[in-house]
Image (cartoon, rainbow, N blue to C red):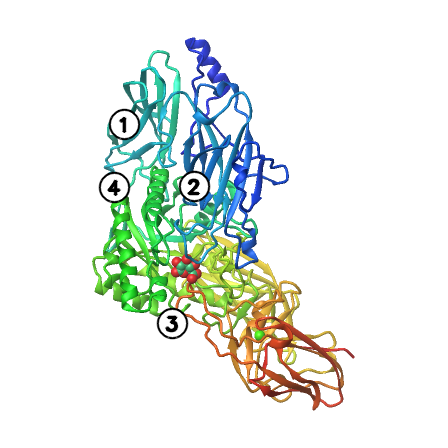
Amino acid sequence: MKKDKNTSRQKISHWMAATALSLFILSPAHAQHETQTINDSWKFLKGECTSAADSAFNDSQWADIHLPHTWNTDAYTEKDYYRGTGWYRRRITLPKDWEGKQVFLKLDAASKAATLFINGKNIGEHAGGYTACTFNITPFLSFRSPNVLAIRVDNARMDIPPISGDFTFFGGIYRDMWLTAVPDQHFNLTNHGSDGIFISTPQVSEEKATLSIRGEIKNDAREKANLELIHSIYQPDGTLLQTLKKSIQLKPGETYAFQNAASPILYPRLWTPETPALYRIETTLRDRKTKVVLDQSNHHTGFRWFHFDADKGFFLNGKPYKLRGICRHQDQKPIGVALTDEMHRRDMKLMKEMGANFIRVSHYPQDDALLEMCDKLGMLAWEEIPIIDIVPETPGYGDNCERNLREMIRQHYNHPSIIAWGYMNEILLVTQRKYKTEAELKPAIERASSLAKRLEKVLKEEDSTRVSTMAFHGSNSYNETGISNITDIVGWNLYQGWYGGDVTGFEKYLAQQHRDYPTHPMIVSEYGAGSDRRLHSLTPRAFDFSIEYQQKYLEHYLPVLENTPYVCGGTHWNFIDFCSALRDESMPRINNKGLVYADRTPKDVYYYYQAAWRKDIPVLHIASRDWTHRSGVQQGDTPVLLPVKVYSNLPEVELFIDGKSIGKQQTKNYTATFEVPFSNKEPLLLAQGNYQGTMVQDGLRVNFRPVPARLNATNLKNLELAINVGSRCFFTSDESQLTWLPDQPYTPGSWGYIGGEEQDTKTEIHNTADGPLFQTLRNGIEGYRFDVPKGVYEIELLFTDIFRQNSSAAYLLGRDGAQENHESAFGISVNGSPVEESLSPCKESGYFHALRKKYIVNNEADSLEIRFQAISGKCFLNGIKLRNIY
Ligand code: GCB
Ligand code: CA
């Protein structure tokens, strides 16, 4: 069972029960709340199989699986990942002593919808892939023979959110499944997937806090019950603070609602991200006469208060407090969303270590393990339901949204970490793209707006102690339509300098919003830029996916967030490189805006945040773990100057290469960048600085492969001269570790392109793992020339025809890949001898498919010149590689 979850109940061990028995000499009904997972021994079938609901159905041919499970690991390779039905079956033999008890089945998450059958009978359905549901299955159970549980799961439903969005809607039962047995008198365990106990802290100050506990008790017996309800409040150090006791009499079948207030707690220890002091509330239901425990629940609570101010930002416990946050998706390549609890906890620890104090649990409710860690580690949280891009007309959609919202709030209500509930993300984005005319657009906006108003009402009804929020894309339409007035605070997802414009557009946008809508407290609910470890640039540009551009972008955004008082904070998009099956770009199926890779290895830029946010530890990090394979063009024997960046919170940093100092630098914006002379094959970089009187160091060995600017018989010997034509990025292949250099124009005595212009695509390239190399090209290229001595050479040319109209996915804010259709064909010659009469890369390998051609040529001159002659369309070249054979 899951231990230590603050929503889980205590299992009373056997000896405890035995002691109780001997002490009180009870009735034979065993008095305890027992709960355990049923994650093992499942049978699974991907596909529809209606007869699988029957208990007699033979599932021996099905796959053996255990939970958590998803059927969508295909989403890492297929854009069109499986959306449909999957069936799960399992036999359950119940312990003898559960007979006469109430038995509950809880599904922590099945995406998107689950229909459950026990022994052939339909026991109910749950619509919503990110919240839990609980069923009382007692009437359907047998204690004489194994019970057959069959669950039909469906991730194709379009009446359940999400129906649109930049992430994969993984299908399956991907969180835990539980069985719980309680006596006839118990708390309301079927309250929207929660355990039916709700704790709030209506008033908190430094001097005094109040605490209220609310819930329901059920008597499922045919006799009346005399009970005792006891609340024990424990201090953060574990000592008992106070006990509340109530006597209750319940009629047969009665449900009783209680709301009890603790006596005020004086000088409470306040909960903050820095001091996450948790009080424990143990709520116990006992038989009044025998004192036997019937049901018990344990929750943590924390005392804190907060408010959002449109001018001054966020306040925690009365003090200004910047929300330093990240957004987090829940998958991990290659396993999808079927993560263990410890994987969720690892993510929380990584975020905390980075110095974050806030998380946007996006775009949907996540595992209880995550929220438990928010409470314990100290991370404020915004959690939301996945209503994204557009509100459809589909019948039932609004009802499902409303139920999912209630479920999220009730299931995670008790977490002191939660300060905001959200229910919509960029709801006008696809709406505006889909409906072009005013006549079509109006009702669609009206739908979004009225659903928002409905949900806002539900949210406040469920929980008036948190703020409501929505996240908008960077368009003023949310203000113009009045949608921005619905919630307490607004979130802006801003990508200036990524999907379009310049990074300075970011602060301009914020300033304008603040000026025009001065009463809206705001959070930057998203900002981010993609990055790919294989791509590096000395002149980074938006959308080149270089590590350097992501760094540059974030180094601009973070100081704005930190230094703009009216911005309550920001949540970086996204903590991880996550799965978005529809996405192409440099890493198809992956949105690579993460601060950590899919396997959670931190990117260098993680340490930029750590340097900015952690004051309590020294941070000194040579930001070159992402760029260990370096290359550069070398003039003669002079070392190649390449930048090496250090992220640090120390005032001053010194950098050494192979023991030689490059100098000292004051850090600015937590960075110091050194121009380092590289000549050795495996230089050792060392950074050094002083933190409060102690010397701190970071060392890193990198690889360096110089490429001579001028080629001669000697330096050509073992050289594989590879050039990423049409690009300003170095590209290092994951498969060969070979680095392809940024392109350069031909100059006499050296090598480079002649004519043409850079062009690129974000569309996935098939037939290769080196996509980015083929996504960039020189269009209209006339030639490529190497000034090299006589000899036999291998020339390899890389092509991919990217000139086909392709519709860009709607989520690519503002970018569209509209290009003209034309079929290019060209002739190629080397030193005047034709090697291709008419090469048409799109005919040879298909549009967006990689094509590589090698030619062995005998160079009898002192240069090699490749010439391209257009036959139709334009000539282009995506990459070139030269090797001297002899
Ligand atoms: C957004 C969306 C988010 C996307 C992100 C992106 O605005 O809210 O779901 O993943 O942009 O990376 O484009
Ligand atoms: Ca290229």
The mark found on residue 373 in the picture is: 2
Location of residue 231 with respect to 73 vertically, above or below = above
Q: How many other residues sit within 10 Å of disc 3, few (<14), some (14-19) or many (≥20)? A: few
Would residue 595 be found to the left or right of residue 490 on screen? right
Identify the residue position indicated by label 3 in the image. Answer: 502
In the rendered view, tell whether residue 160 sits above or below residue 517: above
State the CA–CA distance, disc 3 to disc 4. 42 Å
Q: Quadrant of ligand 1?
A: bottom left
Q: Secondary structure at mark 3?
A: loop
Q: Are marks 3 and 1 in contact (CB under 8 Å)?
A: no
Q: Earlier in the sequence, mark 3 or mark 1?
A: 1
| First in residue order: circle 2 vs circle 4 | 2
In 3D space, how far apart are the residues under numbered discs 2 and 1 (Cα atoms)? 30 Å
Type of amino acid at the residue the image marks with label 2:
Met
What's the mark number on residue 257? 1
* Sequence-wise first label, 2 or 1: 1
Q: Nearer the viewer, residue 589 or 161?
A: 161
Mark 1: secondary structure = strand
Task: Label 4: state its secondary structure.
Answer: helix
The amino acid type, in three-letter code, at marker 3 is Asp
Q: Is residue 464 left or right of residue 94?
A: left
Q: Does 786 appear above or below 318? A: below
Tell which tag, 3 or 1, sits nearer the viewer. Answer: 1
Give coordinates of residue 109: x percent, y percent: 45, 41
- Tell me the quarter of the picture where residue 268 sits: top left
* Residue at the spot of label 4: 461
Foreground label between 3 and 4: 4
What's under tag 1, amino acid-wise? Ala
